[in-house]
Amino acid sequence: MVANHNEELPTGDPEFVSGPALILRSLAARPARQAVVSADGVRITSGDFAAATYRLAHELIARGAARGTTVTLLTGNTPEALAARYAAGLAGARVVSLYDGMSAPVLAEITASVDTALLLVDAERYSSATRLLPLIDVPTVLTLGPGPGAGARGGTGSAPAVGEDVIAASADRPAEPPDVRIGPEDDLGIRHTGGTTGIPKGILSRHGTYRRAFDAPIGSDPADGPPRLLAATPLAHLAGILADLTLQRGGTVVLQRSFDPGAVLAAIARERITDLWVLPPLLHQLLDHPAIGRTDLSSLRSVLYGGSAASANRIREALKVFGPVLVGLYGMSEAQLISALTPQEHGRIGPGGQVPVGRPVPGVEVAIRAPDGTDLPTGEPGEIHLRSDTVMAGYWKRPDLTAAVLHDSWLNTGDVGYFDADGYLYLTDRAKDLIIVVGGHVHPSEVEDLLVTHPAVARCAVFGVRDDQEAEHVHVAVVPAPGQRPRLEDLRAFVTERKGRIFAPEVLHLVDEIPLTPVGKPDKKRLRAAATT
């Protein structure tokens, strides 16, 4: 169960070193090394980045950031976003990132639900801020750099100001760590995932849990040279965690605003990238890009992939193109890293076979169980449960949801899988009705509840369909309202405006009736089968 946010706060552990503090110590230890390369090519040394982050932490503290408060970030892939996250962590505040792809009303509900005290906006999200600010009541809104009204990049000089420039305000603050004691039980942040309650579920993590991520076997070995990570997917997701590990291990983070396969390939060659994270559909985009055959990929030491099902044929193709550098990851926000498939273990993928997600990483215990909780034998699929010291503290302000998935320190992941005789884990399905798309998770019931309010929709069922490369797409079967004939583009616009673009259906099926299972639920297996024939 999540601790009530009004409970007495822990006093901190003088011997504990938090993740943000660990990163800043590493940066300050070698001030001349390159730490961050912005999407515009600006190169920032570790010393300059650490000094700016320390100053920002002092400024945030002066404006009320402290243990028990929430600093919310409306930011893109910028150096300022990284610095703000670390600065808020050094101040002791919990950090929340507002994801791109969600509508302003949903972001407003998240902002309110996490008790935001300070909202920080960078240049990449000024347009989002102008839509969000009228919907929220936040004590303090600040910009990470000159706002659009000051003629910042992307602004016109006449645009309304978003807030005061907190980076400029921090210029005279000390370039040294703030005197804030952080303990392992202090809140680190709240990450949001899909939910069925109107807004995404908030996953509360603690500093002690996240500190263990720095011991995880992710990315290339620093012993082979300082890593250079290309962050081409949102820092608010896994790319941000990988950026933390890279900077702490003495490496460099190269930022891109968004994933563009041609730009990614060019950056790999130009910046001598060693580490890259992609979802399988993005890996497919790289493989299909015409520049792949003439791009120098020799610097790559670790191409991490995961987050959705991977096609065995495409993974074998990727092995031929990139070499033995692929690492398959299976994890979730509620538990961090669960298992990994190393480059040497990719030989287990047979012709036309399924791609395993590897073996559980050290410190993670995995059990395959039947719905009644009994353990199942090797080879038999069941619900995946796990136990580790990296499991979340719980769902923010939702003890009911927490109790539904956490039992006696075991987490029910909602995924279905099995172990083979050699201890490799395979995923076969999801116990939860969930569609994994590039950019996030879609709970069909959320989209269904919204679509039935459209005047052209009488009934509907939303379901996921995988293509021949295992990428998942949102489909909707609709029974039209009398006299209506809904169009896909209208339904997409309707959903995008109210929930965000990642929730919008890609394919519309007009049907006379929604088929039902014997217990009266929409038969999505039949709908999925009909959609793929």
Image: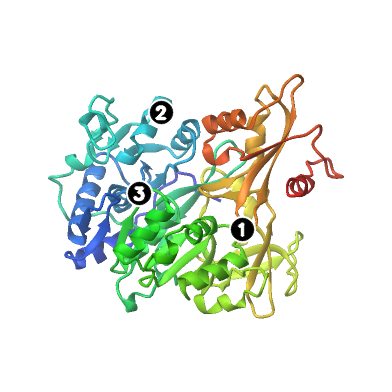
> Marks 3 and 2, how far apart in space?
20 Å
Q: Which residue is tagged 1?
A: 469
Q: Which residue is tagged 3?
A: 77
> Marks 1 and 3, how far apart in space?
28 Å
Tell me which numbered mark, 2 or 1, is placed earlier along the sequence. Answer: 2
Q: Residues within 10 Å of mark 2 (few under 14, many from 20)?
A: some
| Image x and y of residue 275, in percent | 39, 66
Q: Residues within 10 Å of mark 3 (few under 14, many from 20)?
A: many
Q: Amino acid at mark 1?
A: Gln
State the residue lying farthest toward the right: 518
| Image x and y of residue 101, in percent | 48, 40
Examine the rendered structure and indicate whether residue 59 appears above or below residue 391: above
At x 26%, y 29%, the residue is 156
> Marks 2 and 1, how far apart in space?
36 Å
Front position in the image: 335 or 463: 463
Q: Amino acid at mark 3?
A: Asn
At x 34%, y 66%, the residue is 273
Judge depth for marks 1 and 3 and give the one in front. 1
- What element does badge 2 sit on? helix
- What element does badge 3 sit on? loop
Residue 336 in view of the camera = no
| Image x and y of residue 370, in percent | 75, 63
Examine the rendered structure and indicate whether residue 179 appears above or below residue 359: above
The dot on residue 131 is: 2
Q: Amino acid at mark 2?
A: Arg
At x 18%, y 55%, the residue is 51
